[in-house]
């Protein structure tokens, strides 16, 4: 089973460039999440989607946009990358938040110069 | 607002010892609590999910306990091994979101 698949694994951008991080899950999960992880800051929620067709802001949404393309896919877009967005980005999914475990992808390591 | 705290931030213990990792949360109205492991440069792997109606959950050498009334969970690792070296994180759901602690970085000394 593939679980949660993120692409790309690594990316280097120049300030002002744009890119989209892709995430897909094959577990028929309703909820999907985007987190960023920085040293000393832990995991911080950027955006989440509780179900297909809905998206909501998390703790640190500024500078990002998301699209829940269908039940399987949830993408994260940086319209104009900034050095402060250098981080490791994780996508995750779960069935019922109240009942089922959260499953993570392997992450995208993004550097903005 | 739900806050999740893990103390200590780092821990080193000799191989073979039993150890306990701590997780505390401020809002006791939780559905469940989940423990994860993260190896350097890798994603998070779910270890145990303990429902609010449970007091304990076990998997191999791992045992997680939950005390909702005191806002605490512990992860007990028996007979630690160098392969247990990793960062351990706990997380609780809040509405449609999942809130994480910052983790405890565990180093098992051979």
Image (cartoon, rainbow, N blue to C red):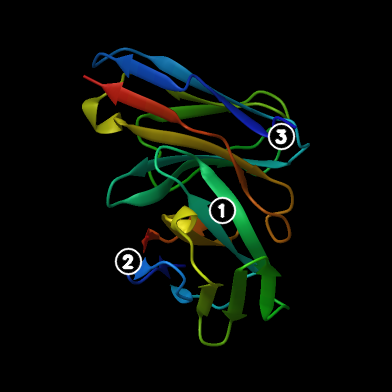
Q: Nearer the viewer, mark 1 or mark 2?
A: 2
Task: Give the quarter of the image for residue B8.
Answer: bottom left
Specify whether disc 1 shares its chain with disc 2.
yes
Pick the residue in front: B106 or A113.
Answer: B106
Nearest the viewer among A22 and B43 is B43
- Report which residue position mark 1 lands on: B97
Chain bearing mark 3: A
Q: Quadrant of the N terminus of chain A?
A: top right
Residue A29 coordinates in the image, percent (x, y): 74, 40
Residue in the picture at 73% in, 48% down: A95
Query: Height in image: B1 above or below B105?
Result: below
Judge the density around disc 2: few (<14), some (14-19), many (≥20) Cα neighbours within 10 Å: few
Of the 4 image quadrants, the one containing the C terminus of chain A is top left
Identify which residue is drawn at 45% across, 74% down.
B17
Residue B26: image x %, image y %? 45, 76
Cβ–Cβ below 8 Å for labels 2 and 3? no
Find residue A107 and name its label. none
Looking at the image, which residue sits at the far front?
A: B110
- For label 3, the residue is A52
Q: Chain of mark 1?
A: B
Compared with residue B100, is residue B75 higher up or lower down, i.e. above or below? below
Helix, strand or loop for disc 3 = loop
Q: Which residue is mark 2?
A: B12
| Residue A5 location (% of width, % of height) | 61, 28
Q: CA distance from mark 1 to mark 2?
A: 32 Å
Are the numbered discs 1 and 3 placed on the same chain, yes or no?
no
Count residues near mark 3 (Cα–Cα under 10 Å), then give few for <14, some for 14-19, many for 20+. Answer: some
Measured as percent of width and height from the top left, residue A46 is found at 44, 40
């Amino acid at each position: 089973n593939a679980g949660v698949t993120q692409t790309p694994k690594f990316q280097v951008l120049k300030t002002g460039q744009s890119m989209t991080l892709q995430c897909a899950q094959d577990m028929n999960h309703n909820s999907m999440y985007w987190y960023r992880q920085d040293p000393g800051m832990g995991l911080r929620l950027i955006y989440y989607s509780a179900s297909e067709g809905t998206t909501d802001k998390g703790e640190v949404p500024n500078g990002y946009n998301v699209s829940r393309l269908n039940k399987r896919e949830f993408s994260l877009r940086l319209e104009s990358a900034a050095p402060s967005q250098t981080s490791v980005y994780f996508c995750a999914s779960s069935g019922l938040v109240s009942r089922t475990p959260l499953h993570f992808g392997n992450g995208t390591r993004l550097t903005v110069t | 607002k739900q806050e999740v705290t893990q103390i200590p931030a780092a821990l080193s213990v000799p191989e073979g010892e039993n150890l306990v990792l701590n997780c505390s949360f401020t809002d006791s109205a939780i559905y469940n609590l989940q423990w994860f492991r993260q190896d350097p440069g890798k994603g998070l792997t779910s270890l145990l999910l303990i429902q609010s109606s449970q007091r304990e959950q076990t998997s191999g050498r791992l045992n997680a306990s939950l005390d909702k009334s005191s806002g605490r969970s512990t992860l007990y690792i028996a007979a630690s091994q160098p392969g247990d070296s990793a960062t351990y994180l706990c997380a609780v759901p809040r509405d449609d979101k999942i809130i994480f602690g910052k983790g405890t970085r565990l180093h098992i000394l051979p």
